[in-house]
Amino acid sequence: MICKKCGREYPDDMLNCLWCDAPNNQHVAPEPSEKIDFSKALDVEKNIDTIILKRIGNDCAQESEEIENKVAKHPAGNFMWCAAILGMGGLLSVFFAPFYIAFFHRLEIRKNHSIAKFTSAYISSFIALKVIVNGLANITRKILESNFFREDLVDFIKFAMDTGLFLIHFWICGYVAAFIIKRLTPDYEPSEYKLTSVSATIYSIPAMILLSFANNYLFET
């Protein structure tokens, strides 16, 4: 840019001349950067759904309006109790859960998909979400260890965090299973699902107890 006042050259993106401070009347303001929609970024449920959908596959992720309506009305709802109960039995029980659920719902799953699709989607989604949750928990613990907070407050925060992690783990197990089963079995009859789900939930309690003992024997002895 050549200054009209002093005739000297200066960069085009300057608001004023470097030499005589005359205004640059030909300056064009840069386009504003794309705005970040924090409401979308903080939509936890939507972000979790995206993580799970990526592990189900494109054939289920790209839902038509008809499939979306079926998923919304699916009898599984947003939580599967048998998966959540099994999730309380330790690591062995957690990884047994998808095979247990697939066994009970195998007839419906096999109509359009394979048992392996359900189990792999569940396990990979669970691991991905737990890595994120545990990572945030570890960061919080390191902050608490910095001696910035009072000791009594730190103890309270740790107790609240441990309780929260327990509830989040319980919720993840039940939510992930329901989310996947709805998309793999959109045509599940409500009466048939309810009957199968009740049986799976009842038997999941003794299964969880047995797997909990097995988990303690294998990993804590």
Image (cartoon, rainbow, N blue to C red):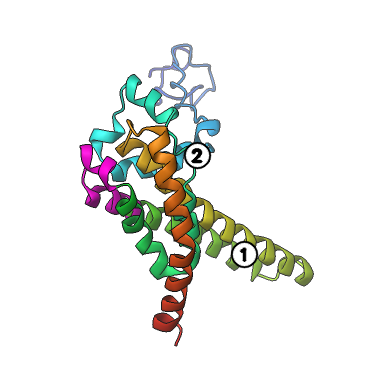
Amino acid at the residue labelled 2:
Glu
Numbered badge on residue 45: 2
The answer to which of marks 2 and 1 sits earlier in the sequence is: 2
The amino acid at mark 1 is Asp
**Is residue 109 visible to the viewer in this orientation of the structure?**
yes
Whether residue 9 is visible to the viewer of this picture, yes or no, is no
Badge 1 density bin: few <14, some 14–19, many ≥20, Cα 10 Å: few
Residue sitting at x 55%, y 61%:
137
Which residue is painted at 26% across and 44% down in the image?
A: 107
Relative to the observer, which residue lies in front, 32 or 11? 32
Q: Position of residue 78 (x, y in %)?
A: 49, 40
Q: Is residue 104 left or right of residue 3?
A: left
- Where is residue 77 drawn, in percent x and y? 48, 37
- The residue sitting at 44% across, 28% down in the picture is 73
Bounds of the magenta segment? 106-123
Indicate whether residue 101 is drawn in magenta. Answer: no
Residue underneath mark 1: 162
**Above or below, comparing residue 104 to residue 11 in the picture:** below
In what quadrant of the picture does the C terminus appear? bottom left
Q: Looking at the rendering, which quadrant does residue 93 occupy?
A: bottom left
Taken as a whole, is the magenta stretch helix, strand or loop? helix
Left or right of residue 98: residue 157: right
Name the residue located 44 percent from the left edge and 12 percent from the top edge.
26
- Circle count: 2
Image quarter where the N terminus lies is top left
Judged from the image, the secondary structure of the residue bearing numbered disc 2 is helix
Foreground residue among 20 and 139:
139
